[in-house]
Image: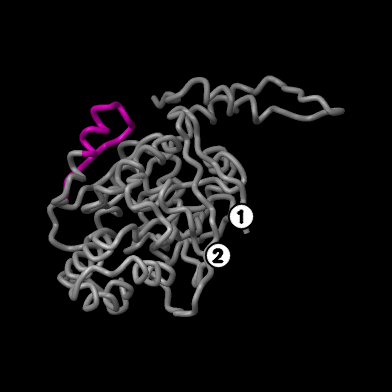
Amino acid sequence: MFKPRNMLRFMECAMKKKRKVCHGRTVYSIPSLREIWHTACMMLISITWARNEADIIESFVRWNSKIVDKMIVIDNASTDTTPLILQRLVREGLPLDVRRNESIFHNQGPALTELMHALAVHEKPDWILPLDADEFLIGTRGNPRETIETLSKSHVSMIPWRTYVPTAADDPKDKNILRRIIHRRSAEHPQYRKVLIPRAFHHEARIPLGSHTLLSSGGVAPAQSIDTLALAHFPLRDPLQCRRKIIEGWERHRANPDAKPGENFHWERLYLEMKDGSPTVQRLEEIARNYATTDETAVDLVEDAVPLCEDKSSTPSVSRHT
């Protein structure tokens, strides 16, 4: 039986559902047993395919583990310190399950699909959230977990990216990604979104490369775009990381016999440039401004730092930015 990880947070959520403002006063009514049980039992599990993410993996786990009930990270044969960092976080007691995959291909979609199907049988979560190691779930209008509780379970929810861009003004000595990189694109063209998958689709659906849609037996699963959640996305963080990501990513993708034309086009178009050497800081910013877009039009940046939560028991949320 699932038990709430944080009883204080559980009781707070239950009482918030029964809070009303009447004549200027906050009034609470007692939640029903059914409402309490629903709050206690909502299970949200994130699933991740990661390789060589040592510069960001700890921040990724610490942030998202405040929101989800369990994180499962498939380490795809990392050769940096990613496995050591993950094992240290497991020993620390974070709700983290680390698995190893030795595939020489960028086999993300099939691996996450197989994991989702296994979770549907053995853990039966209410929601499964595929996350890349450079994505941080945030609420744009409040607590993200409470937001998820209000979502319809009859269709997939599509969460938008907010892509963050490193600039020459960033302090390279600051190893905390969230504190160092504080500018993001003012607009996303196109607006990519990632799936948040309710239980009804866990048994049969398929997660394709990138987790930007969900496929069912009848085609694309029914989905609805939402803006009450967002994914703070940090794909490029420094010149060396950028070069390694592009070269390794494209070579492993190209080696996959199941790779399709057009997939990971952003790696392909940068591959030869990265083979010649790491980009300058200025060139890194140019690449990040248009990373994974088909439109090379210059995009403005806005300062919109993801707020750091020093209290590990708190849940992160941000105000809505336009």
Total count of labels: 2
Residue nearest the viewer, comparing 169 with 232 = 169
Any magenta on residue 98?
Answer: yes
Residue nearest the viewer, comparing 24 with 260 = 24
Q: Are marks 1 and 2 in contact (CB under 8 Å)?
A: no
Q: The C terminus lies in which quarter of the figure?
A: bottom right
Any magenta on residue 1?
Answer: no
**Residue at the extreme right of the image, as rendered:** 23
Residue nearest the viewer, comparing 94 with 146 = 94
User: Residue 247 at what x, y percent from top left?
Assistant: 20, 68
Relative vertical location of residue 307 with respect to residue 166 in this rendering, above or below: above
Relative vertical location of residue 85 with respect to residue 314 in this rendering, above or below: below
- Pointer 2 local density, CA inside 10 Å: few below 14, some 14–19, many at least 20: some
User: Residue 252 at what x, y percent from top left?
Assistant: 17, 66
Spatial separation of the CA atoms under disc 1 and disc 2? 9 Å
The dot on residue 186 is: 2
Query: Residue placed at 43% from the left, 39% from the top?
Result: 44
Query: Residue placed at 39% from the left, 24% from the top?
Result: 1
Relative vertical location of residue 312 with respect to residue 316 in this rendering, above or below: above
Q: Amino acid at mark 2?
A: Ser
Mark 1 element type: loop
In the rendered image, which residue does mark 1 sit on? 321
- Give the magenta range: 85-101
Toward which corner of the image does residue 219 lie, by quadrant? bottom left
Query: Residue placed at 31% from the left, 59% from the top?
Result: 238
User: Residue 109 at what x, y percent from top left?
Assistant: 29, 60
User: Residue 263 at what x, y percent from top left?
Assistant: 31, 73
Q: Is residue 71 left or right of residue 164?
A: left
